[in-house]
Amino acid sequence: MSRELGDGHRRFLQTLMAVGVTDEQEARALYQHCCDTHTMQCIPDKLDEFIEAINSRLQPMFMQIRKGMSEENGRQYYALVNMAETDITRMTSDYADNELELFRKTLDLIVSSENGKASSTDILNSTDTMTSKKLKKSETEHLLTRLVQDNWLCERRGEYTLSTRCIIEMEPYIRTMYQEQVKVCHICHNIAFQCQICENPSCGIKIHNPCVARYFKGRVEPRCPACDDFWPHEIPEVRGLRSQSKR
Amino acid sequence: MTQRKRLSNVQSSSQSKRQSNSFMTQEEDEDATFTQPSTSQVQRGLEKLTAAQVDQKTAEVVQYILVKDQKKIPVRRADLVKHVIKDYRTVYPEIIKRAMLTFEQVFGLKLVEIDSKNHMYVLVNNLDASTARPSPVERPSNPKMGLLFVILSVIFMKGGVVRENLMWNTLKKLRVDPGQRHEEFGDVRKVITDEFVRQRYLEYVRVPHTEPVEYEFRWGQRSDMEVSKAQILEFMGQLLEQDPQSWTQQYREAHSTASSSQASSSNHR
Amino acid sequence: MRKARAGGDDEAVRQNGSSSRRRTDQHPGDGEDHDSSSGGVQDDDDDNDLGLRREIRSKYRDLINSVQQNREDMLSPSNNKLTEVLEEANKLFKDVRQAREAALDAQLLVVATDLGKEKASQLFSEGSAFDPSAFAEHLLSFMGLNRLEDEDDEPPNGCASDGYLPKDAWHRLARRAECCFRTAPSFHYMMGSFYTEPPPPKQRIERQRKAPSKEAKRIMPTQLKKMEESHQEATEKEVERILGYLKSYYQDDPSPISYYEFVIDPNSFSRTVENIFHTSFLIRDGLARLKLDSDKLPCIEPVEEEEVEAAGSFSRKQCIVSISPKIWRELIDVFEIKETIIQPPETQSE
């Protein structure tokens, strides 16, 4: 099952360790770069196979380069993720225990919200119910900045959403932990946070904004793909088509 | 509310575990009791284990070292044995050998022992940092590496050891004052004399017979493995518009076999 | 740890000197300061001698200090400062009569020798010398220092060279210096860094359904108001019901009841949260009081009817109770709670 890797594979993996997440276009360029640097053959369409080779060797360590879609722009991303929770993985020191607790509270807020967002006020208030060492307001703000810098959260106008990297890594966790609250996109079947919701109370399906854009593109009267009710939301423009033609 | 306190003790057990890992604990005795098993012992030990068991333990060791490397603190063998190896001590040499192989084959990294007395390991990169063409994916830069570069350069150029006064004075010229909070580095004195020292990038030791007490800086064991003197000299030449060879002694040191086998990477490209 | 550092610690050194002097000299009237000898009543000889010794020591300390502070200057091949210092010391030594001053002379010599050794090694080393100041200057340029053009401008904070560094200065240097390091990239992750625990009770799931249509939005406010009213009523009823449990429990056994045993429903976390919520009204309204028992554990007891009136004047303290499913479970274990005191209301029982 496991394959021999070359320095090109290793450089690709190291770059992902350093950046955490990269979009498909960058990943292709990086693939090319790694092959060129280490005089390996680069077959443009075989990026996923190249990555598969790395994954086969990462598997024993419960690590993986995983692909996922950005809820923001609908493009594909690759992230290096951890897949297991063990005594060893919990020794990670990037965040303190109380910081992790607040992150999970933020996750709770985002998952239970309708639009996949949590306001900074709500997050700050949620420190009241912390069971570990309570974070002060300034500490919370500093933590949120770090979480954005480290690419776990995104922030826009005081509202926080889960980053693409975070969704890619945490999706299995979120699916099991929030089974009843979490919904998947009716179009791409990935878990959906930032999305549009069918307003028919007996339907209520969710569709990612970029999936809405693609699905309803060019339709005069958009109707819900599940219940055929009128789709009353604004249909966003299709974005990020650049690398889509290949697949 | 003692009840709460009692409970929080229960809860914090995981927290204290984490702390004892990240800081070097006084487990010298632990290490002392660990004796390197002999080849025949290892052989016998391996016979009792399945291949899958050994593979799994190896993967755990790799995971553990990756986690510890997040903060660039060297991994002590004593901690490794205590937290991961556990009942597998008899086959320890075999497992560490396999872990080294995994780092090389999968990650392009090298697991090296920096302190053969205290048995500490660090990870260094096997791949060249500089490539013919710049990488299309920009890695985030760590400003502390800039600070560390300055310090290591001054030590190297000054012959391997530098009094702290000279270091602070040089840094002050760069707007880094050990007595003041720096907007990028925070408590600079702590970063330099504590963090860099624990990471083994620097040694910070008291100069004997000085009154008032003075300290001096040297390269730490990690720097010997990780940092290329030839590259420093190269950059130095560019900065000061001078031929690197004009620093005769430093040039000789940078290109001597001893250091080039470890960290110099400038020549073969 | 370190007693004196570069810059400004001159004072401290001297003060140290003067305090030790007081101890060793044991001379009356020597307590004031350096000029006190002029008004002394003791024999002049001794006094003059002391004054001179003090002066010598002070000068030695200045010399030692200046050597230590200006190390770099002294080392520069372009001057003779080290020799000057040694000549000065020779002059001082002529008047040295006692051990304390001689010790200082020896200390200065140690410092100077050390410096001389370094200076010598510099002179004899091959190739160009390395000048840290020049290095720093070039680094500043590399890091993009904005040098102030205008001569009249006051240098900020009296910096040696004027100007300010751009925000990314150290990033810029780090990026260039990267090729000197063979640093391993590190692996960071979020999933797996904490214990997997069930999320809090999902209250919002029902509401999610009701993405309000335009019509629904319009009728919402009145509905909400109605809900709020009925909500309040329900709360009051529930509070009274709970007071009933507290009183009857207290009648059976008139000693304070453990707060946690009272509010916790071992079968339901959400019921526990509700109980805590409703019980807080009993406290607020002065119908029950909370206190700590001999083990410092919170307990609750009802307040007698007569007392309730009087209690109105008492100052009340607030306290926030937090509970998570994890704590809830731990509390059940610790207090060995087998059944709930506050029975769930019949209407909702499944």
Image (spheres, coloured by chain):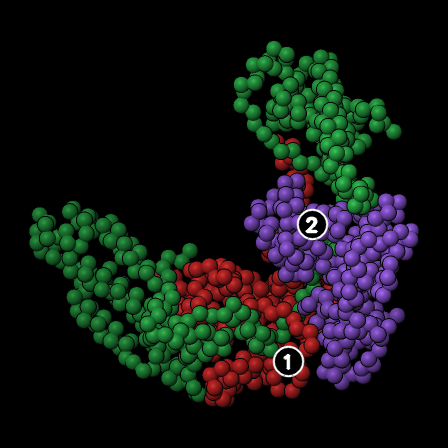
Chain colours: A purple, B red, C green
Q: Amino acid at mark 1?
A: Ser
Nearer the observer, C179 or C248: C248
Q: Which residue is mark 1?
A: B130
> From what the image shows, is residue A209 above or below residue C23?
below
Residue located 28% across and 79% down the image: C80
Residue C346 visible within the image: yes
Tag nearer the camera, 2 or 1: 2
Structural distance between the alpha carbons of marks 2 and 1: 42 Å
Element carrying mark 2: strand
Residue C152 is left or right of residue B232, and the answer is: left
Residue located 76% across and 38% down the image: C220
Crowding near the residue tagged with mark 1, few <14, some 14–19, many ≥20 C-alpha atoms within 10 Å: some
Nearer the observer, A58 or B140: B140
Residue located 65% across and 71% down the image: B139
Element carrying mark 1: loop
Q: Quadrant of the N terminus of chain A?
A: bottom right
Q: Position of residue C110 (x, y in %)?
A: 32, 69
Q: Chain of mark 2?
A: A
Q: Position of residue B176 (x, y in %)?
A: 45, 66
Q: Amino acid at mark 2?
A: Ala
Residues at discs 2 and 1 in contact (Cβ within 8 Å): no
Q: Which residue is mark 2?
A: A118
Q: Chain of mark 1?
A: B
